[in-house]
Amino acid sequence: MHVVVTGGAGFIGSHLCDALLSRGDTVWCVDNFCTAQPDNIAHLMDVPGFRRVRADVSDGLDIPGSVDAVAHLASPASPPDYDRMPLETLAVGSRGTENALRLAHEHRARFVLASTSEVYGDPEVHPQHEDYWGHVNPVGPRSVYDEAKRFAEALSAAYRRRLGVNTGVLRIFNTYGPRMRPYDGRVVSTFIRQALAGAPLTIYGDGRQTRSFCYVDDLVRGIVAMLDTTEPGPLNLGNPSERTVGELADLVLAVTGSRSGIAFRPLPVDDPARRRPVIERARERLGWSPRVTLEDGLRYTVAWFMNRVPHGERVEA
């Protein structure tokens, strides 16, 4: 297939480009590099079938030639990023999504939206299934990301109903793995960076809040499977193994061999207390379920941080 991946140089997007190229697809990687790292795709620049387009999808999306599928991953995706770029986050969720949908409509291509578990907000239903409408603060500090994704889902559904576009929506839960940025603000990358530096691991709140961590290779298998179907979704993609943040800290310390302590800080506003996906629909409709345990995934991720992150990145906490 000829696949356009918006946000293709990002953490997840670059792994998706790898997977698509490895099976022989042609990939157009579209990114404005506001949060992506060029190193994520440096190894692909000379790979046959790989094309890089430096562009902001919110301003338009012009791809020459045929397009069989569009995977829309473009968006700031961590709290420090969308706090720094609130208007850009809202723009890529609205205008950017519509530009990607128009491209799919023009080419009669499959369209898959990378939505997020954040559409559930601080959920009052646990675990979270796709029929749950969520509990989101529309004006809180996280709202620019939450509501941008909720609007993107609504827009995708409207293009499907009104214009017959072959759309699909995936709700992605906490993902981790190689190519995460050390200072992206995500809990896994923060803990690993701090542990390798010998600095205290920062836990916000009491550490009893839960998350469900999915290794990036597992997630990408699910995205590829979704691209190959006409399934509309929404479908949850995540690992239903629920862990507390405190347990994650203990695992990171064990994997790194670090003697770092723990530093507790106040819990941010609207931070979800519990998060775990119900993935029965993904199992039934995509034949997908995660394979990599958190312990193994952390080993792979720590090894990447130790081998790839410049020394100076690990010194600071």
Image (cartoon, rainbow, N blue to C red):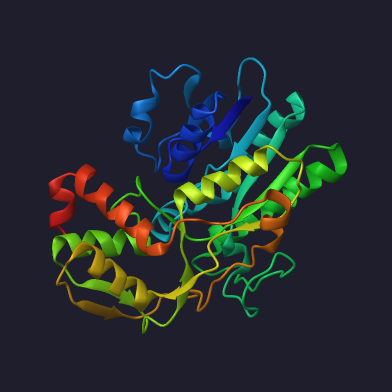
Left or right, residue 259 beside residue 210:
left
Residue 241 x %, y %: 50, 70
- The residue at the point 37 percent across, 80 percent down is 207
Eyeballing the image, is 81 above or below 24?
Answer: below
Left or right, residue 109 beside residue 244:
right
Image quadrant occupied by the N terminus: top right
Image quadrant occupied by the C terminus: bottom left
Q: Which image quadrant is residue 227 in?
A: top right
Residue 121 x %, y %: 59, 70
Q: How many marks?
A: 0
Q: Which image quadrant is residue 253 in?
A: bottom left
Residue 271 x %, y %: 47, 74
Foreground: 42 or 144?
A: 42
Residue 204 x %, y %: 35, 77
- The residue at the point 40 percent across, 40 percent down is 34
Eyeballing the image, is 169 above or below 252?
Answer: above
Left or right, residue 59 beside residue 251:
right
* Residue 238 visible in the displayed image: yes
* Residue 152 visible in the displayed image: no
Eyeballing the image, is 95 above or below 234?
Answer: above
